[in-house]
Amino acid sequence: MHILAIESSCDETSAAIVKKTSHGIDVLSTVTATSLSLHAATGGIIPESAARMQVKYIMPVIIEALNEGIGNRKQGKEITSWKTAREVLKNDIDAIAVTYGPGLIGSLLVGVETAKTLSYIFKKPLIPVNHLLAHIYANYINRKESEIKFPYIGLIVSGGHTDLLLFKNHGDYKWLGGTRDDAAGEAFDKIGRLLNLTYPAGPEIEQRASLVNNPDLKFKSPLMGSHDFDFSFSGLKTEVSRFVQKQEVVDTNLKNKICHATQKAIIDVLVGKTLEASTKYNATMILVGGGVSANGKLRDQLSSASSIPVLFPDAKYTTDNAAMIGAYGLLNQQTTSWELLSANPELYFA
Ligand code: KG4
Ligand code: ZN
């Protein structure tokens, strides 16, 4: 079974062709266009600009994914034409999986309406996908399905969300808690803006933090020890902002120390609460996903503190991509008809 997967919830326009094999979810192609550089200039995403770029990229990205994943292999040469892509869609694709929420409404609509149109024209079943659950399913890519055992704890750490879930089976999960205000990635980005770092700031904060040898600065890990599975990161931003305002100069050395203390405050609480959840619910494993799961310190700290296996996606599948949407679609084949599907920017967990 081949799935065409489409992701357009924010500033990435992505299409992928995926199939299930005995060694896991195989990605035949992932093609992603991003309008990130446009937003880097303003230090945050402008929804209107992101949606316009989605409109521009959506068809070229889908055509390239169809040709790269199947068309070129069949024909033995590089093709970029819509004619070949159309033949592939008609003859080789069994279903279309698409992100229908959460996300920016203008961006989501582009992917959802395109998927609905293709579903109608080519008579293919549609699989609506919750973007957040798909971040966890990025862990199934290139990994034998039998290696992942339920029940597991899922930690979603992205630019817009921070959530802990208990997965008992495919399609059977329970939300345990999430952020009350800013997401972990958002905290990295907002603190990065205070320090004039490149947007999105996670990678630069991680890199600067790694240069600190004597970490004598500390910020509080919010809600640490609160005995629930909630998070809150807006207070950390305020604490860092107050600290920065009190300094006469913030030289490179101090900037790096602030990055180190910020990263530590965020990671300590993520690790602490994830481990608490895994103990409370007798989990067999922990699966992490979302942009912040690319962070090496989070990977090391959680893996070494946990007594059960911790899985992370390949770095290229941590940020938004259509392959993870396809992975979720292949493992949860709940189809709908195009007439019934609408984008839902507020979609959360049922
Ligand atoms: O999952 P994602 O691509 O977007 C959403 O769906 O929200 O996540 C983007 C977030 C940004 O906030 C970015 O700063 C963060 O992931 N990020 C990182 C790292 N790489 C990306 N945060 C910490 N360390 C990193 N290495
Ligand atoms: Zn995401």
Image: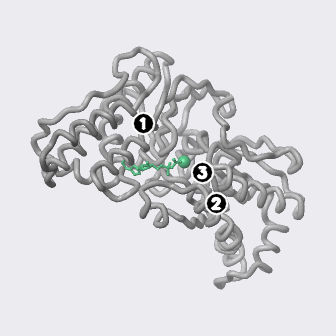
Count numbered badges in the picture. Answer: 3
Give percent across and percent down for residue 338.
86, 51
Instruction: Kindly identify the residue that appears in the image at 57 percent across and 60 percent down.
Output: 12
Tell me the residue that label 2 is attached to: 51
Report, in whole angstroms, how far the alpha carbon at label 1 lies from the one at label 2.
35 Å
Mark 2 residue type: Ala
Tell me the residue that label 1 is attached to: 310
Q: Answer whether residue 267 is visible to the viewer in this image.
A: no
| In-front residue for pair 224/195 | 195
Instruction: Kindly identify the residue that appears in the image at 34 percent across and 22 percent down.
Output: 224
- Are circles 1 and 3 on residues that touch, CB within 8 Å? no
Tell me the residue that label 3 is attached to: 324
Give percent across and percent down for residue 199.
39, 57
Q: Nearer the viewer, mark 3 or mark 2?
A: 2
Q: Answer whether residue 12 is visible to the viewer in this image.
A: yes
Q: Please, what secondary structure does the residue beneath circle 2 have? A: helix
- Are circles 3 and 2 on residues that touch, CB within 8 Å? no
Q: Earlier in the sequence, mark 1 or mark 3?
A: 1
Report, in whole angstroms, how far the alpha carbon at label 3 lies from the one at label 2.
21 Å
Give percent across and percent down for residue 235.
35, 30
Q: Is residue 12 left or right of residue 67?
A: left
Give the quarter of the figure containing the C terminus. Answer: top right
Give percent across and percent down for residue 331.
68, 43
